[in-house]
Amino acid sequence: MNSLKMFVRIALVVAASFARAGDPPAAAPASETLARGKYLVTIAACNDCHTPWKMTAEGPRPDMDRMLSGHPEDMVLPPAPKMPEGPWQNAFAATSTAWAGPWGVSFTANLTPDRETGLGKWTVRNFTETIRTGRHLGRGREILPPMPIPQYRNFTDEDLAAIFAYLQSIPAVKNRVPEPRAPETVAKNAM
Amino acid sequence: MRAGLPTPLFLLLASMGVQGIVRAADVGTLPEHLGDTGLYASGSVTQLQPDVLQFSPQYPLWSDGASKHRWIKLPPGTSVDAAKPDAWDFPRGTKLWKEFSHGGRVETRYIERGMDGVWRYASYVWNASGTDAVLAPAAGIRDLPVPGMRYSIPAQDDCRACHEGSPVPVLGFSALQLSADLRALTSRGLLTNLSSDLLVRPPRIAAKNDTERAALGYLHGNCGHCHNDDGPLAVLEMSMAQRLDTKTPTDAVVRSLAGVRSEFRMPGGTARVVPGHPEASVVALRMQTREARAQMPPLGTSEVDVEALSLIGRWIEGLSVQ
């Protein structure tokens, strides 16, 4: 497929995602777009943090039954460990979905298209602005480590549209991720 | 713990900016000095150019108690097209400034609509002697040394976050905000196509009482530029913007808040607004914190607006359960 066709198809995905309520249903994204999005999600290591990991006979593996659904809401974590003085300052949960550090505790987001707890209501603009600005929905609180915003913000618009199209195509998982914990809470609880 | 340990470690370092690449700023064409933007007479940093108009919105944005001055300048012979009451169309070449002072002048924010139709945003930081203001870096400045407070110059992304959340990036120069000035602006030729209804009956928030009018006005001026039903945050289905093209804008705002579950959860909060109970209303709870992960507005302020918090509290206490 030549690049012009790819561009046109991705542009259609972008346009469809900007559509407002009341507009006719958008056409499904092209299979090439979804494949591109899946490829980018894979090599950008989204599953490393947004899919809960579990222990298997072969060692820790991402639990693909909960693919990209973020930190499990039923996994209530105790306070993060207080790190000793010195260079060690971060910790993360065995699921790889909760991270503690100087910023507090962050929980990875549900990226599945569930409308209540995931990205189901989002538009491609919401997604693009979130990655570009490092703020929730492009204008809310800052996205916390370990999300590599300084790198991901360099994705092209076409890349982000393809990633978003793919994320909208995966199975929806209802999972309400906890709000992040402030650093003060970490310090106080850990003492 | 797992074989793939290096990847999250890489992500952690990357997220902390270790290998970050900052996108190019979009302000390359803006002047380096405020004095060259067209606000002041040549060689002055106090005397305004004659075609610069000062204005004051009736529901101003809270800016940590800064005293502010605002000005607009239109290209000669042009006017603002007010045909759409909630989305005025500003001519290419429009310039706006907002000066922030805490004792002395700290910064002047600047918006211009270029001749290419693109809106650009910048902030100019005043020197201590008040003789010059220089273009701030695109990433902004955190914790500028201003006596008695933490003061931050917004980043370019911050400018866009607030100004590009509604149909028009100009926030304080609108029909509702300038309700008392519409006739004067029209007679001066600066405003065209304003509906005769709005000239005869300048817009006023239709509220049950003065407290509700003031509260809804505050929410409009401080929250409505993001929380509206025709910008990117429409997906939240929470509007605090008063729309003049709607017959019942007040009801629409209250309906989107009162008794509606908050997507953001915080201790004690049970809904966006709980009629009669500001202590359980997430809107009020987020207004009264400056913890970075929870505060509202999320940027542009590090001090709670105590007076407004009291106003919103009184309004919520007076709301009846539907």
Image (cartoon, coloured by chain):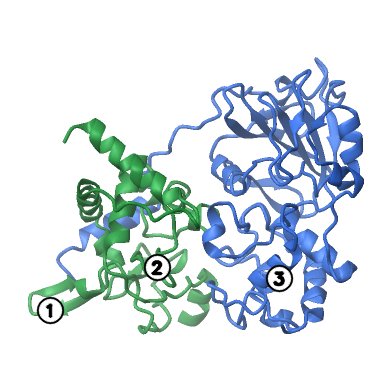
Chain colours: A green, B blue
Would you say B148 lies left or right of A93 here? right
Do the residues at discs 1 and 3 belong to one chain?
no
Q: To which quarter of the image does residue B77 belong?
A: top right
Numbered disc 2: what chain?
A: A
Q: Nearer the viewer, mark 1 or mark 3?
A: 3
Q: Is residue B291 above or below residue B102?
A: below
Q: To which quarter of the image does residue B154 belong?
A: top right
- Give the class, few, some or many, for how many residues have Cα within 10 Å of label 3's Cα (few <14, many ≥20): some
Q: Which residue is mark 1?
A: A56
Q: Nearer the viewer, mark 1 or mark 2?
A: 2
- Give the class, few, some or many, for how many residues have Cα within 10 Å of label 1's Cα (few <14, many ≥20): few
Q: Residue at x 68, y 43 (%)?
A: B87
Would you say B288 lies left or right of A151 here? right
- Observer-nearest residue: B249 or B130? B249
Numbered disc 1: what chain?
A: A
Q: Are marks 1 and 3 in contact (CB under 8 Å)?
A: no
Residue B227 % position (x, y): 62, 58
Q: Is residue B283 above or below residue A154?
A: below
Residue type pointed to by label 2? Gly
Do the residues at discs 2 and 3 belong to one chain?
no
- Give the class, few, some or many, for how many residues have Cα within 10 Å of label 2's Cα (few <14, many ≥20): many
Give the number of the disc on residue A118.
Answer: 2
Quadrant location of the N terminus of chain B? bottom left
Q: Which residue is mark 3?
A: B254
Residue type pointed to by label 1? Thr
